[in-house]
Image (spheres, rainbow, N blue to C red):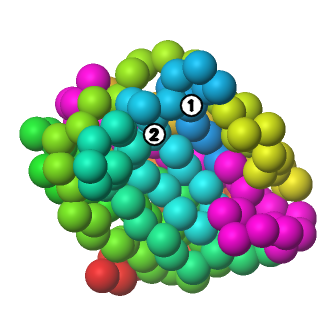
Amino acid sequence: MSSAFTAIWIGRVNSAPSDEFGYNLMTLSRTPDDFEKEFFFNTDESGIYWDTPNGFGAYSKYDPMPVGQWVMEVFVRAPGATSAFVARYGPSSKLQVTPLTSTPAPVDPDNLVVGADIRDQKMYLDGDVAVVMLFNRAVTTSELLTLAGFYAPRFGWAAPTGVLP
C-alpha cells in the first residue's frame, strides 16, 4: 500500500536503549522473510523502507524518547505518499512536529508487531505500552492535539496549547 496512513503509539521507556537504533515501537511487514516494503517506528528513528537504489520512501532520525515519561509518538504519511511527518507529545504543552521528505513507496499491510524487531531479533522494548492506533488516513495536527487533550489527564500531561515546528 502506498496510501495515506497514521501510526500512533503511547507509552514510556524505562531505560535508555543500549544501541543507536533505540527500542522498537512498532513495525508493519518487517519479518525475516519479508522486509522490502516495511514501515518501522523506533524510539529515535522511523521510516518506510523498500528495495530501490535509495532505499527509503521516508526516513527521520530524531531525539530519543525521554526515559520514564509517558509520550505519544506519531508517524503520518499524507495522501499520495509525497509528504510525511513525525510528531511527539508529552509533558510539555506543545506537539513537536518534524516534516519528512517522502516519495511514494509501498508498505505491505501485514505482520503488525509492537515492541520488538522480529526481523533482526532485537530492539525489545523496555517499557510500557498503553495505546497503539493505526489509521488508514493521514490524521491532522489538529486531530492530534484533540487526541493529546483527551489523553492528557490519564498520562499527567499539560493541556495542549499548540504545535512546535
Q: Amino acid at mark 1?
A: Arg
Check the picture and name the quadrant holding the C terminus.
bottom left
Q: Which residue is mark 2?
A: 39
| Whether residue 110 is situated above or below residue 92 in the rendered picture | above
Assign a secondary structure to mark 1. Answer: loop
Instruction: Tell me whether circle 1 and circle 2 mark residues in contact (CB < 8 Å).
Output: yes
Q: Which residue is mark 1?
A: 30
Assign a secondary structure to mark 2. Answer: strand
What whole-number distance in Å separates the C-alpha atoms at marks 1 and 2? 7 Å
**Front in this rendered view, residue 133 or 111:** 111
- Residue 100 placed where, x, y %? 28, 65
Check the picture and name the quadrant holding the N terminus.
top left
Q: Is residue 34 magenta?
A: no
* Outermost residue, front side: 53
Left or right position of 95 against 140: right
| Whether residue 52 is situated above or below residue 99 in the rendered picture | above
Which mark is first along the chain, 2 or 1? 1
Left or right position of 151 against 75: right
Q: Residue at image x 51%, y 75%?
A: 62
Q: Residue at image x 34%, y 49%?
A: 55
Q: Badge 1, how many Cα within 10 Å: few under 14, some, many 20+?
A: many
| Whether residue 41 is situated above or below residue 1 in the rendered picture | below
